[in-house]
Image (tube, helix red, strand yellow):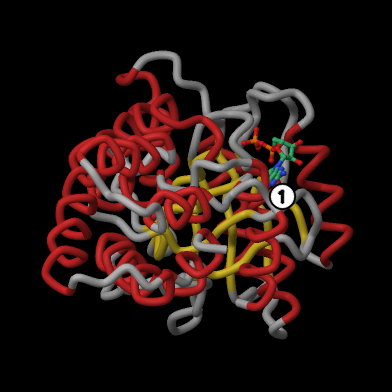
Amino acid sequence: LVRLRARLARSQNAFGKTLLGLLSRDTLDDDAWEEIEDTLIGADIGVAVSRQITEALRTRVQVLGTRSVEEVRALLKEELVKQIGPDFDRAVRTEPHGDKPAVVMVVGVNGTGKTTTTGKLARVLVGDGRTVLLGAADTFRAAAADQLQTWGERVGAEVVRKEEGADPASVAFDAVKRGIESKVDTVIVDTAGRLHTKTGLMDELGKVKRVIEKQAAVGEVLLVLDATTGQNGMQQARVFAEVVNITGIVLTKLDGTAKGGIVVQVQRELGVPVKLVGLGEGPDDLAPFEPEAFVDAILG
Ligand code: GDP
């Protein structure tokens, strides 16, 4: 959490600073409140929620008659934490059940950071003393399997892969089969993220999931979203949510954006919690998502 805070503070993520600046103006007239709302919208929080937060703040500031920076910050923090939803279960299900490994599917559009997230998650688990196997079911992107292989060697996880262009479902099947045979704790399957057509995607991910489920339960389907892509990312998230049952969101590249507000939007719309955040390209740059620490970070 300290790391989450430090990383986000170092990034351009502090739209909260702009808000606090606006809130500490001498007069808070309609224009000022509009600017506050615009700042929230600009941070990708979403129009409706931005209005809601602004109205709530406006009422509370008026009722309390307060203008002290500390009090205003506390009110803003409270409103933001409320919107981010502190009561989601954000645990990532990686515990084996019986003699079967836990299976985690990692889905999302290419370039969002799926393979990197798969590697980083493996690193966390291996660091906790778990055995992990990685399935390179992104057979579409040329370098994906090599990239995953490198991660596997780096973190100490076996990698199951096939030739480029192989059927992703057959790789997933083999990975889980091998994982069961070698009694690993967790199998993480990196999938291909071609957003060709909705039915194409649905067929592909559906098939991957079905062949896995012939052997072991899929405990998590993590959707990887690039925080820097804003509304485009939201649109992608909607498509994935329609084709596969997502259990958690990984928001990557939070280190490179001032728009962390996408957290609020994506959770509200999909009803699924952000469970992990990506804070860089390195092996240790994955952190559990913690709403309070996150809000503290964006408020600077
Ligand atoms: P994939 O196509 O979805 O598997 O995406 P990759 O895992 O190959 O990642 C695409 C690029 O984003 C790579 O250059 C990664 O190093 C980079 N990347 C992934 N996660 C993060 C993150 O949290 N922060 C930053 N700054 N870069 C990231």
SS assignment at label 1: strand
Q: Is residue 257 above or below residue 201?
A: below
User: How packed is label 1: few (under 14 Cα within 10 Å), some, or many (20 or more)?
Assistant: many
Classify residue 110 as left or right of residue 182.
Answer: left
Residue at screen point 69% across, 64% down: 122
Q: Position of residue 186 (x, y in %)?
A: 58, 69
**Front residue of this view, candidates 278 and 220:** 278
Quadrant of the displayed image that contains ligand 1 = top right
Q: Which residue is mark 1?
A: 160
Check the picture and name the quadrant holding the C terminus: bottom right
Check the picture and name the quadrant holding the N terminus: bottom right
Three-letter code for the amino acid on which mark 1 is drawn: Val
Classify residue 68 as left or right of residue 37.
Answer: right
Q: Within the image, what quadrant is residue 219 found in? A: bottom left
Q: Within the image, what quadrant is residue 184 found in? A: bottom right
Residue at screen point 51% across, 37% down: 169
* Residue farthest toward the front in the current orientation of the protein: 26
Q: Is residue 63 above or below residue 24?
A: below
Q: Position of residue 182 (x, y in %)?
A: 68, 71
* Residue farthest toward the top in the current orientation of the protein: 196
